[in-house]
């Protein structure tokens, strides 16, 4: 008799996600901020676990790439650097590009890597790719520290407009988030994305003004070229740090492209989120 009464009085909680969710819920993400920090810290530790150099790899990789590009494109090919020393010019492009490519690549596979969490525990799924991107921010900070150290070595000082650098980093983070969350959602259904992404990032690297100035592109093609969000971002960061000339039309188009990618990415993720536990 007592068992029957206990069963009748038991409270059953049914978690039923609303079908009227927005692109993302800032208040809900804030409630789960500790989960974001925990996952970001876990990804950071896993990335450099059992390595001798640890976080110094975040400094060594752009340093080696800068040296190689400076020899082949700066010395041998004689590509212009808009008046800045070529090693600084190329490093100023490599640092933001490294963040963008690492963030997008890491976010793309983040849901699949954390499939047990997705299946067993409820929390906003958007937290997983966002925490992955947050773990890449440390590498970017190390990269900028390397850039400013290299500037001192070349006898250069950051331009006064360097105060605007955080604004352009924010735009870059918006574009990386948009692309990353969209690909992470698509990758749950189509794992081909994981094979296509490295190849696509290599192509995008040469479609971004890393080793050459953007004004090398013919005037007619620049608006179309600027739809690549990293074009305007790299140009703006070079303007703010090195004081090189800036094409504000290209920067404006790339900024709008970044915001459009962010909205599109969040929309794709939001519409796909309900099916993750069944597909993953």
Image: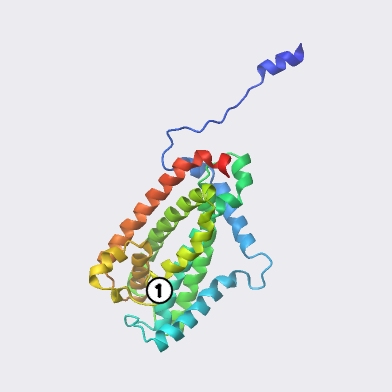
Q: Nearer the viewer, residue 65 or 207?
A: 207
Q: Nearer the viewer, residue 206 or 61?
A: 206
Q: Quadrant of the N terminus?
A: top right
- View extreme (top): residue: 1
Residue in view at x 67 percent, y 72 percent: 52
Q: Is residue 255 visible?
A: yes
Taking the image as shown, residue 108 lies to the left or right of residue 224, namely right
Residue 29, position as x, y percentages in the image: 49, 44
Q: Is residue 25 visible?
A: no
Q: Quadrant of the C terminus?
A: top right
Looking at the rendered structure, the number of numbered marks drawn on it comes to 1
Q: Nearer the viewer, residue 238 or 228?
A: 228
Residue 170, position as x, y percentages in the image: 40, 59
Q: How is the image coloured?
A: rainbow
Quarter of the figure with residue 132: bottom right
Q: Is residue 131 above or below residue 74?
A: above
Residue 36, position as x, y percentages in the image: 55, 50
Quarter of the figure with residue 161: bottom left
Taking the image as shown, residue 247 lies to the left or right of residue 263, namely left
Q: Identify the secondary structure beneath mark 1.
A: loop
Q: Residues within 10 Å of mark 1 (few under 14, many from 20)?
A: many
Residue in view at x 37 percent, y 87 percent: 78
Q: Is residue 186 above or below residue 233?
A: above
Quarter of the figure with residue 213: bottom left
- View extreme (bottom): residue: 76
Residue in view at x 49 percent, y 71 percent: 143
- View extreme (left): residue: 220
Residue at label 1? 210
Residue 194, position as x, y percentages in the image: 53, 57
């Amino acid at each position: 008799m007592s068992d029957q009464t206990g069963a009748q009085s038991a409270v059953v909680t049914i978690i039923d996600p609303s079908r009227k969710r927005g692109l993302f819920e800032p208040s809900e993400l804030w409630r789960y901020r500790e989960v974001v920090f925990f996952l970001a810290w876990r990804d950071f530790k896993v990335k450099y676990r059992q390595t001798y150099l640890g976080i110094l790899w975040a400094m060594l990789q752009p340093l080696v790439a800068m040296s190689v590009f400076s020899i082949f494109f700066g010395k041998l090919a004689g590509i212009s650097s808009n008046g800045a020393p070529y090693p600084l010019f190329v490093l100023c492009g490599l640092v933001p590009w490294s963040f963008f490519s690492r963030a997008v690549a890491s976010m793309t596979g983040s849901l699949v890597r954390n499939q047990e969490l997705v299946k067993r525990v409820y929390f906003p799924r958007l937290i997983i790719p966002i925490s992955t991107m947050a773990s890449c921010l440390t590498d970017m900070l190390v990269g900028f520290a390397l850039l400013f150290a290299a500037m001192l070595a070349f006898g250069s000082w950051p331009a006064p407009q360097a105060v605007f650098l955080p604004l352009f980093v924010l735009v870059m983070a918006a574009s990386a988030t948009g692309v990353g969350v969209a690909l992470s959602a698509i990758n749950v259904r189509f794992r081909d994305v994981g094979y296509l992404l490295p190849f696509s990032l290599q192509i995008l690297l040469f479609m971004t003004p890393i080793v050459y100035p953007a004004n090398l592109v013919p005037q007619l093609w620049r608006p179309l070229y600027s739809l690549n969000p990293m074009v305007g971002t790299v140009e703006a960061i070079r303007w703010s740090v090195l004081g090189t000339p800036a094409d504000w039309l290209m920067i404006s188009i790339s900024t709008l492209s970044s915001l459009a990618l962010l909205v599109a990415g969040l929309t794709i993720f939001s519409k796909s989120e309900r099916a993750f536990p069944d597909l993953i």
